[in-house]
Amino acid sequence: MIFYDEKKRIFHLQTPDTSYVFGMYGDYIVEHLYFGPRLSDIDGIEPFKENDAAFASHNFEYHDNSIELSTELSLTEYSFFGSCDMRKPSFHAAYEDGSRITKMKYVSHKIFAGKPKLPGLPSTYTESDNEADTLELTVRDELTGLVLVYRYTAFNTYNAITRSVTVKNDGTQTVNLKSVMSLNIDFERSGFDFVNLSGAWARERWLERRSLGTGTTKVESRRGSSSHHQNPFFALCSRNADEDRGDVYGFSLVYSGNFEAGAEVDTYGRTRAFMGINSFDFNWRLEPGEEFNTPEAVAVYSDSGFGKMSREFNRLYRQRLARGKWRDMERPVLINNWEATYFNFDEKKLLEIAKTAKSAGIEMLVLDDGWFGKRNDDTTSLGDWYPDSNKLPNGISGVADGVNKLGLKFGLWFEPEMISPDSDLYRAHPDWCLHVEGRGRSLGRNQLILDLSRTDVCDYIVSFMTDVLSSANIEYVKWDMNRNMTCVGSAKLPPERQPEVYHRYMLGLYDVLEQITSAFPDVLFEGCSGGGGRFDAGMMYYFNQYWTSDDSDAAERMYIQYGTSLVMPSTFMGAHVSAVPNHQVNRTTPLETRGYVAMGGQLGYELDVTKMSDEELAEVKLQIDEYKEVRSVIHNGDMYRIESPFESENCSWAYVAEDKSEAVLFVFKLMVHTSTLPRRVRLRGIDTEAHYRLRGSDEVYSGAVLENYGIKIDQKRDFDATMLIFDRV
Ligand code: DGJ
């Protein structure tokens, strides 16, 4: 709900558990007043009004009714370069006279039910207008005619506030937008810890936590994609916050390109949180009459630690970011041939894998890289999306039919955004890749990136994908992207628009994804970028699941899936059982452990099942049966992280059905050390008034005992794994 107090000129955004309050202070300052536990009313909330500090400048034009005000000392909802606020501005633009000063004055606001779509950009949504209220607050720069619309949505059943900004050029001059953040929140205090998810290829989204001192702390990507290295998410939390306790503010950007996200602590002890498209190397020329929309930022407040914050993000993203028929459907257990064969396969081999996989209960075969052009290694053929007749003499439809006849669905890998210099496509269109004339073309994994800022290139992708997907019974697509952007330039854009390429690429990509996913609504789309390189909220508007990491080792995956779960629900995480010794880290872990870790996501297999023993295949079959028993709780329930692999050699998490009737607890050991005794693991999120039976036994436990005393776990070998299912009696 959103309320407006006309007398005080204060807006009160309410979700079930939180309130977000801000107001107009005069006509020039939109002042942030509160974000925290839900308030029933705003009696007692008043403007901050501080103006007295040495070296804090006053801009007299900013005050109304003779109140002097320093914008540097005020807590603003959106901050402007040139307004005397010395902190990082949300907005920075350059005008034709060379000035970079912007001064925005209140024009109007409207509050309405529902949530509008963000043109051309992914965003959370409502299915009916009574799910949320939206406020649009319009401000205008009288000198330049530039108009900004601050958009806020408060959900009625999710504890999330979303924000985005539309810039409209209602003036007569071209405006160069240099920085337009999606979100700015000024907290009246400091003393926060900063938590982010950083990593590398095959080590995505490891947890990092540090104490904030004065100055700016931020995470960012300059790689043209949100990246393996930093995720467009961060949290500010009280120093004592843990999984179950403390204030946590989480921020997630629904965007997949260059971003910046962070916090600036000033010398007055306040903290500014910001998030948006990276202003580094960004410039957008906004012509008269044009509009620019920022991506959406999602803010979640939790008064009960990181666990609640994650459950809020997980639920919102699972239910109102993910779309399409697969959003609410159980996904097939798949086998992917990549780690089984790499490029070395043919139809016969694939059908052998499919046949054995079927006998173990697997439901879909995914044909990965190497099926097209002359692609026997990664040096060639991206762009030549016709089947290699040596490997697939009967084409894609031949192998798909063969797989279908064995009783499995068929899925196919693509890397549509890429082009190999050794490809017919490149020979025909050498200017279709991102490049800068005279600077050479820098390769990554031997390939170049198609210039998706161009509509002809986007049209080509839609057309070849449509052709291939229509040519056979393809029920799943893996959409990969295996390098970051370098030498970024477009042959189609004039010099002054070159700094727009990164963002125009994203707009092109989102448009292509929208067209293809809506043309093939029955196909299950899984995203991938060398594993989890672009695993962000922007992508999850189009893809129902995402290949979480190229590291398929069970122990490594504990860290990766634990970190990923801070924002992303298990239903998004592709997780496969692979061979041992593991191909990325050479580690050998038990099949049982690999299975239980992978069950924390969308379970799949990625190994040559034809080389497994009968006992191993029987174990796989058992795993899949067990998984099917619990997957609806894993994917539709609430996740509780219990033991963090970042803090000890123990890792555990649980999934609890929304009505608390069932809980699935996974407990893992990393390395065993001498003198380690059995431990008690305390289940979370269950009904403490009820009793639960341990499935497969006669043991009945009080919910309160399970939560507070815990259950004894005795794990004596490295990488031991335990799954326990509790049913309310
Ligand atoms: C990177 C992906 O993450 C892998 O799973 C695999 O699809 C390879 N690309 C294929 O080149």
Image (cartoon, rainbow, N blue to C red):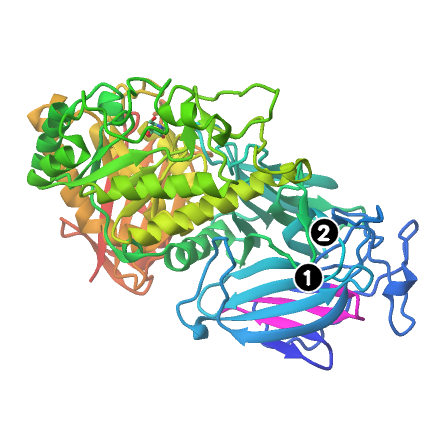
The answer to the question of whether label 2 and label 1 lie on touching residues, with beta carbons closer than 8 A, is yes
Q: Quadrant of the C terminus?
A: bottom left
Question: In the image, is residue 333 above or below residue 135?
Answer: above
Instruction: Inspect the magenta stretch and tell me whether residue 442 lies in it.
Output: no
Of 103 and 85, nearer the camera is 103
Of 148 and 310, nearer the camera is 148
Q: Which residue is mark 2?
A: 91
Question: In the image, is residue 296 above or below residue 61?
Answer: above
125 sits to left or right of 475:
right
Q: Quadrant of residue 48?
A: bottom right
Amino acid type shown at disc 1: Leu
Q: Quadrant of ligand 1?
A: top left
76 sits to left or right of 434:
right
Label 1 crowd bin: few (<14), some (14–19), many (20+), radius 10 Å: many
Instruction: Name the residue: 15% across, 27% down.
Output: 350
Q: CA distance from mark 2 to mark 1?
A: 10 Å
Q: Which residue is mark 1?
A: 148
Magenta highlight range? 11-30
- Where's residue 484, x and y in %? 50, 29
* Of labels 2 and 1, the one closer to you: 1
Badge 2 or badge 1: first in the primary sequence: 2
Q: Quadrant of residue 215?
A: top right
- Where's residue 641, x and y in %? 40, 46
Q: Residue furthest bottom?
A: 7
Q: Is residue 518 visible?
A: yes
- Where's residue 243, x and y in %? 47, 48
Mark 2: C-beta under 8 Å from nearest atom of ligand 1? no
- The numbered mark at residue 707 is none
Amino acid type shown at disc 2: Phe
Magenta segment, principal secondary structure? strand
- Where's residue 602, x and y in %? 28, 43
